[in-house]
Image (cartoon, rainbow, N blue to C red):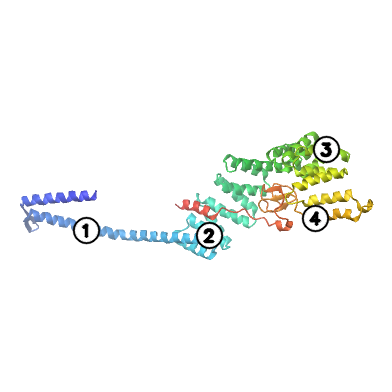
Amino acid sequence: MRRLAALIALGVLAVVAATVADYPGSVDITWQGWEIDTSVGVLVAALALLVLMLWALLALLAGAVRVPGRFRRNRRERRRRFGDLALTRSMIAIAAGDAGAARRHATRAETLLGATPLVLLLAGEAARLGGDEDTARQRYTALLGDKEAAFLGLRGLIGQALRAGDGAAALHLAAQAHALRPTAGWAFETLFALQTRAGNWEEARETLAAAAKRHLVPEARARHHRGLILYELSRLAERDGEKRRALSLAASAQDLVSDVAAPAVRHARLLIAEDRRRAARRVVEAAWRVAPHPDLAAIWGELGGAVPALELVTWYEKLAACNPASPESAIALAEAALAAQLWGEARRHLGRAIAAAPRGPSRRLCVLMARLEDSEHPGEHSGQPQSAQGGSREWFDRALVAPPDPTYVCARCGGENDEWLALCGHCHNFDTLAWRVPDRAAPRAALSPPAEPIPLLPLSDGLASAGQSAR
């Protein structure tokens, strides 16, 4: 386009020059006693030269005026370029765990770029890495003034509160973060975990319901969580004397959490307290089909009442018929047979349970076998030889080195819990206990690490959001 305009301009000049050449003419100018006599061509050339000089002078003046602006623009561009480089180096230093370099580069980036959200976040992370919690708190708090980056500031402050052990402050900040970004999975997970740790079950129930509507939680997991929350609400209702509500909540908890025996145990005990033994029996039978457990067997014995030992064996056979393949059914029948002095039956059922143990007889089975040997061969009372007594000793010795029995093991920290609760007794995480054999027979103290704070989002996620805010 520019070339076409230049060609047109040259063509016009050529036409003008040719016209002047064909019609030379003369020009006479008289002004203030001065007289100029020249040709038209010379006059046109003089005018063109004058215009060209004026244009050059104006261009020179305009360039001089623009020099300060260009200098400032180039300076800004240079500062931005070096600031971006400092940000990159600070991120690399944080990822490498080099606190000194991270703070040095973050400070340079703040000097060059100012207090942008990304710079503030990096400065806060660098200060946190170096152990300067006060500076980190200042940077995170400064982020709260930016609407787009406030979530990142809350994230950092929540992490500080958790590291300081201030659960109340962390919970308050997590509620703000969730209100600010209700669709953020991290905000929900953090708020929900803090609510459950604090025992705020009603609030946790509402938070979970809202998250399930937004599909932040898989349906199966949400269902399981709801059941455990109802279980805890049932405990609270019973403590407050609301027996009807406690019973209703326990029934709902059992329906939602069928893979855990504890809700069924609570449901059955509440029914027994209401003298609804037939309903309690149905509850135990339904739970035994899915999650047989020694606590259910104990309640079944209570439901049997004070009957003779032989009748109690028949009573337990009804329970075992609900899940005949389970080792717990064999153990329950063996214990009932031991109480009834049916040594052969007890040995048969214990043999089934031992055969089903993949790692060999557990401590519990070894103790039961020792009891059987002691009961069947009482030794000095029946005149049996010492070799007969050695059977019980052998089983007691085996119990010392036998694999551990199933217990409630936390999937998060590996800690063992004697009692089932919605929260692990060691790390206080929610819905992490499962009834299973521990991975290794370690002392319980070794499996009881101190509770760790909820982990924050990876730094890269936070940086990505802050970068969008900066742009």
Where 347 falls versus 272 (above or below)? below
Give percent across and percent down for residue 45: 12, 56
C-alpha gap between disc 1 and disc 2: 56 Å
**Mark sitting on residue 315:** 3
Which is more foreground, mark 2 or mark 3? 3
Inter-mark Cα distance, 3 to 1:
113 Å
C-alpha gap between disc 1 and disc 4: 106 Å
Residue 110 visible in rendering = no
Along the polypeptide, which appears first: circle 2 or circle 3? 2
- 76 left or right of 249 in image: left
User: Which residue does the numbered mark 2 point to in the structure image?
Assistant: 95
Q: Amino acid at mark 2?
A: Ala
Which residue type does callout 4 highlight? Arg
The image position of residue 224, as x and y in percent, is 66, 42
Residue drawn 81% across the image and 38% down it:
317
Q: Are marks 1 and 2 in contact (CB under 8 Å)?
A: no
Alpha-carbon distance for marks 3 and 4?
31 Å
- Does dot 4 land on a helix, a strand or a loop? helix
Q: Which residue is mark 4?
A: 398
Q: Earlier in the sequence, mark 3 or mark 4?
A: 3
Q: Which mark is residue 56?
A: 1
Instruction: Give the CA distance from mark 2 to mark 4.
Output: 51 Å
